[in-house]
């Protein structure tokens, strides 16, 4: 009962937030100088005031601001995010086509970073001054300091010229034929490098966080109680301590999710991954405002969903967290 | 007293490496506990009471601490230097322990039933269902009402007294031979303290478990314990039967501890007795000289006291004291 109430409340807040995001995006883009008429006129090689006015009428840009906003919002409710001037396709179709690739990259990188980061953190916490702990500290500083595009390019160089085992561009190999399983394996093969690149920064963050959190928990009285009960050290670490240490990691992983999405934009560009990031880049360069707004809408949507999931996960981990 | 004691701690020495040099936290501590007996250990904070308990459990924090020498035997089995896995099987099974902080000694993310059942699963290879049944049984045994429901509660849903009962249930779940209770009532209300002591006594009579009761509550010692050891600065300075030690304390420190206990009198006299205290503080363990550690605070100290450490020698029937003055008086 309590759990469902909380979830319903969170979803309600999420919807309100989404509306706010839509309005804010719309306002921001409207304030920015230049509009689609300028772009089209530019492509045409110049136009007089009459033609400009005609273009504006065609796209409804001559209407007052609130009318435009209302039209946009009522469109969104019907899953209509407008029409892309540049790609000449409905924005929704355009995004839904690219979204799976991005979601695959973002979620796999995030999951990899959280799991491997946490495990490294736990192992480092076992011996806080041991060689593994120092290595984790070093790697995490390195991963945190190195720009994603640079890590990506280094990996490309490594896997193109030295160990050509992973493809460095695209998501599928068109020459691969076979059933679903073979296709999926091909995608995974292509996913490896972009995923590792994107995960590297966050892995660094989570391993440091898990290490610090574990060190604190390992000094707690209940860990001593577990040892006094004769619980094997491995179980003390992974059951009694880790469950308590996970809170901060999960919280930060939830907060960082939007950063993972923005990181994906760069990683997609480096590895020619056919996702939203590539689309975002193209549409920004082409000033394709409906597409840009659509992408912003979808990424906020994903971030809000992930935040709700984070809340639920935290509740599952720690019974002391009450609804609110 | 022909039979061997159940738990025998002999000449145990624990050293801590600190920034200020080596601290000898336990200095040749020797204690015996017979089965079915309650041994009280008293002393000020930092005198080595808890460290004695941790060294019996093999849980001396390392680094910086280390059991340097000595022997701890339970049922004739040597625990010092024992293989980690074997020691783990003894912890929780043969020796149970209750800590002084019930608020933080239970894991907040597991139900109390699960925390008790875990111990039963570990040591008796019990199936989850059977282990949980035992957990409920134990909760009922420590007089927690509605044990079945409470087993599903998380620690934060219980009061301090309840949590300490849970800790006792956990420590006794595998019917240990020895229960170490390290200041089990320090963090609790006075009324709850009495309840917990009553409970310990009842359980002790029922199960015959030997108890090491660590406390600075002289009243509790007088009421519960059979024998008592007084510790000061890492050493046992006086031990014997409770009657002998409390009625005729020999060591000036023990005398001090006893006069420190406030008394409530039914008819308060016109002029109130002043509450006694022992002057000074416990010395830093890194700065102990070669003499008796209590000498600087002792009103009866003689020259010999600051030159040489006194050993525990008989000063009465079933009563030993490490004090030059007391030993001299005895000799005369």
Image (cartoon, coloured by chain):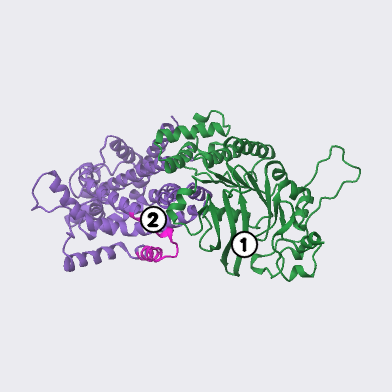
Chain colours: A purple, B green
Q: Residue furthest front?
A: B2
Q: Residues within 10 Å of mark 2 (few under 14, many from 20)?
A: many
Q: Residue at x 39, y 58 (%)?
A: A123
Mark 2 belongs to which subunit? A
Left/right of residue B159 with respect to residue A85 in the rendered view: right
Residue bearing mark 1? B28
Q: Residue furthest top?
A: B146
Q: Is B191 or A7 nearer to us in this picture?
A: B191
Q: Residue at x 26, y 51 (%)?
A: A105
Label 1 to label 2: alpha-carbon separation: 46 Å
Q: Is B304 or B161 nearer to us in this picture?
A: B304
Q: Which quarter of the picture shows residue B125?
A: top left
Residue bearing mark 2? A206
Residue B1 picture location, percent across and down = 64, 48
Q: Is residue A198 magenta?
A: no
Q: Residue at x 28, y 59 (%)?
A: A197
Left/right of residue B255 with respect to residue A267 in the rendered view: right
Secondary structure under the numbered disc 2 in the rendered image: helix
Is there a contact, CB below 8 Å, between mark 1 and mark 2? no
Q: Which quarter of the picture shows residue A138?
A: bottom left
Q: Is A321 or B127 nearer to us in this picture?
A: B127
- Residue A47 seen: no
Q: Relative to residue B26, is residue B32 depicted above or below?
A: above
Residue A51 picture location, percent across and down = 20, 49
Q: Read off the magenta span.
A: A116-142
Secondary structure under the numbered disc 1 in the rendered image: strand
Chief secondary structure of the magenta portion: helix
Q: Which quadrant is home to the N terminus of chain A?
A: top left
Q: Which quarter of the picture shows residue B309?
A: bottom right
């Amino acid at each position: 009962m309590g759990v469902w109430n909380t979830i319903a409340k969170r979803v309600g807040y999420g919807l309100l937030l989404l509306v706010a995001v839509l309005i804010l995006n719309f306002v921001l883009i409207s304030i920015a100088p230049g509009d689609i008429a300028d772009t089209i006129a530019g492509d045409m090689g110049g136009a007089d005031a009459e033609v400009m006015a005609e273009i504006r009428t065609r796209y409804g840009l001559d209407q007052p601001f609130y009318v435009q906003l209302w039209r946009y919002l009522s469109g969104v409710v019907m899953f209509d995010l407008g029409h892309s001037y540049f790609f000449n396709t409905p924005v929704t179709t355009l995004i839904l086509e690219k979204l799976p690739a991005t979601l695959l990259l973002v979620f796999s990188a995030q999951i990899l970073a959280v799991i491997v980061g946490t495990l490294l953190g736990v192992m480092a916490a076992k011996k806080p001054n041991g060689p593994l702990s120092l290595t984790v500290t070093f790697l995490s500083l390195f991963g945190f300091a190195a720009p994603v595009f640079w890590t990506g390019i280094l990996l490309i160089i490594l896997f193109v010229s030295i160990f050509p085992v992973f493809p460095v561009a695209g998501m599928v190999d068109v020459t691969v034929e076979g059933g679903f399983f073979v296709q999926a394996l091909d995608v995974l093969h292509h996913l490896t490098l972009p995923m590792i690149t994107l995960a590297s920064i966050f892995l660094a963050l989570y391993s440091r966080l898990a290490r610090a959190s574990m060190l604190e928990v390992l000094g707690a009285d209940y860990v001593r109680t577990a040892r006094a009960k004769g619980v094997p050290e491995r179980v003390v670490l992974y059951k009694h301590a880790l469950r308590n240490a996970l809170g901060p990691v999960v919280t930060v992983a939830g907060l960082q999710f939007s950063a993972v999405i923005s990181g994906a934009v760069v990683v997609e560009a480096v590895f020619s991954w056919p996702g939203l990031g590539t689309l975002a880049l193209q549409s920004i360069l082409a000033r394709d405002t409906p597409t840009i707004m659509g992408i912003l809408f979808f990424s906020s949507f994903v971030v809000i969903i992930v935040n709700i999931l984070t809340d639920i996960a935290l509740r599952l981990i720690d019974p002391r967290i009450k609804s609110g | 007293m022909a039979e061997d004691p159940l738990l025998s701690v002999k000449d145990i020495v624990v050293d801590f490496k600190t920034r200020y040099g080596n601290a000898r936290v336990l200095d040749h501590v020797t204690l015996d506990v017979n089965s079915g007996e309650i041994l009280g250990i008293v002393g000020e904070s930092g005198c080595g009471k808890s460290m004695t308990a941790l060294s019996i459990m093999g849980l001396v924090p390392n680094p910086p601490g280390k059991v340097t020498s000595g022997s701890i035997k339970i049922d004739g089995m040597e625990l010092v230097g024992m293989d980690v896995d074997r020691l783990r099987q003894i912890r929780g099974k043969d020796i149970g322990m209750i800590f002084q902080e019930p608020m933080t000694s239970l894991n907040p993310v597991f139900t109390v039933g699960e925390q008790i059942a875990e111990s039963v699963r570990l040591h008796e290879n019990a199936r989850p269902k059977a282990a949980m049944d035992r957990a409920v049984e134990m909760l009922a045994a420590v007089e927690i009402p509605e044990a079945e429901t409470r087993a599903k509660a998380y620690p934060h849903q219980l009061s301090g007294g309840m949590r300490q009962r849970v800790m006792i249930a956990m420590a006794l779940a595998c019917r240990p031979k020895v229960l170490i209770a390290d200041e089990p009532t320090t963090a609790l209300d006075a009324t709850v303290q009495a309840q917990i002591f009553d409970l310990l006594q009842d359980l002790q009579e029922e199960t015959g478990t030997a108890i090491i009761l660590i406390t600075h509550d002289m009243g509790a010692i007088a009421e519960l314990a059979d024998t008592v050891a007084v510790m000061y600065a890492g050493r046992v300075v006086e031990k014997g039967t409770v009657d002998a030690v409390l009625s005729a304390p020999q060591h000036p420190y023990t005398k001090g501890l006893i006069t420190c206990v406030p008394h409530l009198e039914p008819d308060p006299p016109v002029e109130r007795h002043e509450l006694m205290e022992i002057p000074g503080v416990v010395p830093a363990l890194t700065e102990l000289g070669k003499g008796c550690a209590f000498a600087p605070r002792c009103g009866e100290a003689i020259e010999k006291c600051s030159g040489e450490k006194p050993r525990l020698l008989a000063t009465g029937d079933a009563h030993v004291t490490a004090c030059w003055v007391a030993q001299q008086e005895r000799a005369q």
